[in-house]
Amino acid sequence: MTVFHWPQRVTVREVGLRDGLQSMARTLPTAQKLQWIQGAYDAGIREIEVGSFVPPKLLPQLADTAELVSFAKTLPGLVVSVLVPNLKGAERAMDSGADWMLLPLSASHAHSLANLRKAPDDVVAEIGAIVEARRARGSNIRIEVGMSTAFGCTLQGQVAVDEVLRLLQAVVALGVDRVGLADTVGYADPRQVGELFAKAREVAGDTLGCGHFHDTRGLGLANVMAALQAGEVRFDACLAGIGGCPHAPGASGNVATEDLVYLMASMGIATGIDFGQIIALRAQVAQWLAGECLHGSIAQAGLPKTLRPEKMTA
């Protein structure tokens, strides 16, 4: 029997400034976003997705992404990522100086058409064009493909595992630097997550490097655990569990950053994130987002007395 060895450390990427805010009608002032980035950095977060290079008329909430990248790049050791939907957005990302650009690729045909107005194979072709544009420019920016709706889709229903693996293999062959699996609409269960991550690892190898889970049906952290046991050590999360997908009605948001930090600390797995500081930042963000529906359990219940404080700053 194979003995599972828990990792000593995991990486948490804060994506609330993009995935969280794009789901809200309000536009948070740039000054508050800059404070959010600084606060997350001060709390020990070293990977932040600060925004997206989409047309401002579509998502005015994210129109200041270039300014956020510029500020974030002044913070030593911070890995700055942005989401881009197409080649034009990728060119803006390369101009911005961001470290990573995340390209969404829906495994669901229906979701791909609704979200990007292109079939999955057409998106793969555009990813190829982006890889070539990076080469032609001599850019150092790295490319990550996020496999959306990898576990199911509100529009299409079931998403075939073979289709997920086919698309993963296609983008890995193009030369992207990282791929991740996303439960975009909150359909996944832990068994499904464990099995798909194991199969994806066979296809993508070390290129597989991110789990993105939504807590729509209360299984977000359970799915994180399943991915963790399948060898994944990088996870996306949103402060206060905000965010969601416009094609997932009733979605409650992403896994809450503070809950994920607590989960890891409770098992003795380091994240480098200070719990007290991340909770203080959550309280600040909650003031900025007054009236919005926030989520997360540990911010309400607090730490158990059995958890040594030093474990929350590892």
Image: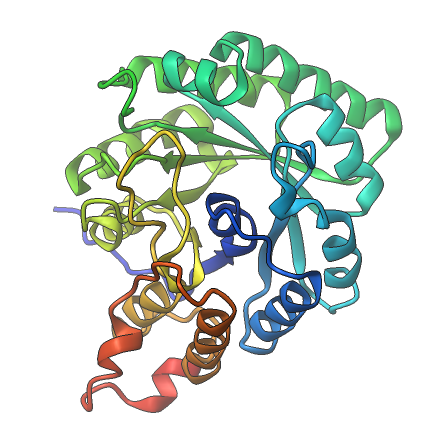
**Which of the 4 quarters of the picture holds residue 94?**
top right
**Is 84 left or right of 274, judged from the image as shown?**
right
**Is 129 left or right of 43, judged from the image as shown?**
right
Locate the C terminus and report the quarter of the image it occupies.
bottom left
Tally of numbered discs: 0
Position above or below: 172 against 207: above
Residue 308 screen position, x and y as percent = 28, 89
Q: Nearer the viewer, residue 126 or 286?
A: 286
Residue 87 screen position, x and y as percent = 72, 22
Q: Residue at x 54, y 77 (%)?
A: 43
Residue 182 screen position, x and y as percent = 38, 36
Q: Nearer the viewer, residue 251 or 221?
A: 251
**Which of the 4 quarters of the picture holds residue 240?**
bottom left
Q: Nearer the viewer, residue 115 or 161?
A: 115
Q: Residue at x 40, y 19 (%)?
A: 111
**Which of the 4 quarters of the picture holds residue 38?**
bottom right
Which color scheme does this rendered protein use?
rainbow
**Is 158 left or right of 67, judged from the image as shown?**
left
Q: Residue at x 19, y 53 (%)?
A: 3
Query: As drawn, which residue projects farthest toward the left?
Result: 1
Position above or below: 183 against 12: above
Residue 229 screen position, x and y as percent = 26, 49
Q: Residue at x 12, y 46 (%)?
A: 1
